[in-house]
Amino acid sequence: MPDPSVADVDGDPRQGRIAKSPYRVLYDEQCEICQGCVSWLKTLDRKNQTTCLPISAEVLACVDSRLRMDDCLRQLHVVTPAGAILVGWDAVAGLARLFPSTWLVGAAGQRFPVRNAGRLLYGFVARNRYALSKCRGGACRVAKPEAVRRQARLGAFWSCYRFGFFIRSPLVLWAGIKAAAQRASIFARTYHERLELLDGKLTLLFLNGMLPNAVPLLFGELFTTVLYDGVAIDPGSPKMRRSLARHLRRVRPKIAKVIATHAHEEHVGNLNWLSDVTGAPIYVSEMTARFLTPFKKLPWVRAAIIGQPPNLRPPFTVLGESVDTESGQLLVIATPGHCDDHIVLYDPREKLLLAGDAFMGSYFATPNPDVDSRKWLVSLERMMALEIEILVEGHGHIHTLRPDIPDFPGVVIREDPKVAIAEKLDYLRWLREQIDAGLEEGLPVRAIEASCFPWGNRTSWESCATDECIRLLSLGHFSRTELVRSFVRTNRDPLPTVYEIRLSGGGGPPCR
């Protein structure tokens, strides 16, 4: 990943931004306490009165020649518009005076006895800061990583990590409330809706069900069946069957084939039912067919909310390298990672990728227990080799810049699909580096997990409330911990073995 300390000074636009910033705040980004305070500063600073810069030799030279690396590492330094340098507690109090909600704290902090007490407390934290850190979160590239590794212990790491969370807890709560409101808005707009695109060639049917509706409301994952050029893809679960039937009565589409991208319950529960209703044959990959005959018993919480799919009944056809549609052909491409049997469908003429769950946003932190992220990396690289102008996710989002795809807030995302895939690749590669480094240090899974979600990364704390809600309500089946485990799978058997071991709490692959 790029070094932010360099990125902030490279290039004329960024140099201009530093030069024009009224208050320049120099902080150590490998310190969770510093990161927490910077998160609050960015939240409070609605008028862009400050610029926060992680310490590096390049940044210090660009900001002010009087700044010294060792001094800045010991205490917070702030360069004011007048060129004065505030240090330590005086810098904290000076920044606090910039904002109405903290002005009183800043004013008191510049006067006896609060100033004296603040300096004593700040000095204690500053002297012991390296003992409260661990060279985690990708910050080792900044200053003195050897000192951090030598002095830090896991107990100190956890103290610092938890304190970082405590500082941000109001921000985490507020981010969770905003995300919940956004999810409710999107769910309301898509409820019982269908979205017809490309002159009817592509249609998204948004599926609902009394208990399945909890998923888009709590987690933002919409349920859909995709109709593309006479092919129905992923017809949902049994508990969404009434919703699918309602759509079919209203639309009466011509369906010549029914296809599943993979064997997860929300994608395959209505395969035989839809085939019986329409007379269309079923097409699945050979591995998916094995997983569905018989379908393994789901954990009770997933069976209760989504629905236990029935076993796949013959007749069905095993997918080859391509499948004919009404007006053309779809290429069938194996994309294991989200699960071992996953495939995507690609229309080279339309440059359209029906991705299923092979792409679920650039940032996805709570995977299912059968994810293999190292395989997923290879599959994403395979997808990057395709010419893609429209990317259709299996859970209701479309990524495209094409003007012939109309706007639909919360569903159509205006971005280049290849850029979105590249961001996902970068994220997974960074995670792989973090997890490999943690395993080499002999860290336990929970410590590695924490290092993969450093509080200095905005997405780590913004998604924290939702991610932990997912962990709680799924009884741990979907969690940040599973994201770490997805990089260390040693059992290369197909889905059922690993899946059942993980969910039953059995052995599974060692994670140290």
Image (spheres, rainbow, N blue to C red):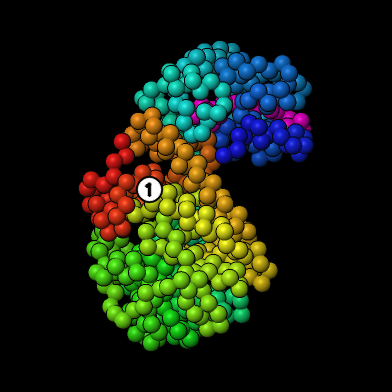
Residue placed farthest to the front in the image? Answer: 321
Q: Is residue 463 left or right of residue 512?
A: right
Q: Residue at x 52, y 54 (%)?
A: 381
Residue designated by label 1: 486
The number of discs equals 1
Up the image or down, 454 lies above or below 315; here it is above
Up the image or down, 293 lies above or below 9; here it is below
Q: Residue at x 54, y 67 (%)?
A: 353
The local crowd at label 1, few if under 14, some if 14 to 19, many if 20 or more residues have their Cα within 10 Å, is many
Q: Quadrant of residue 202?
A: bottom right
Quadrant containing the C terminus is top left
Up the image or down, 86 lies above or below 464; here it is above
Q: Residue at x 40, y 84 (%)?
A: 280
Measured from the top left, where is residue 392 in percent x and y? 53, 66
Up the image or down, 176 lies above or below 301; here it is above
Measured from the top left, where is residue 471 in percent x and y? 35, 49
| Kind of residue indicated by mark 1 | Ser
Foreground residue, 485 or 245?
A: 485
Foreground residue, 158 or 340?
A: 340
Q: Quadrant of residue 111?
A: top right
Magenta span has 34? yes
Q: Quadrant of residue 289?
A: bottom left
Secondary element at tag 1: loop
Measured from the top left, where is residue 454 in percent x and y? 48, 36
State the extent of the magenta-drawn residues as a range.
18-35
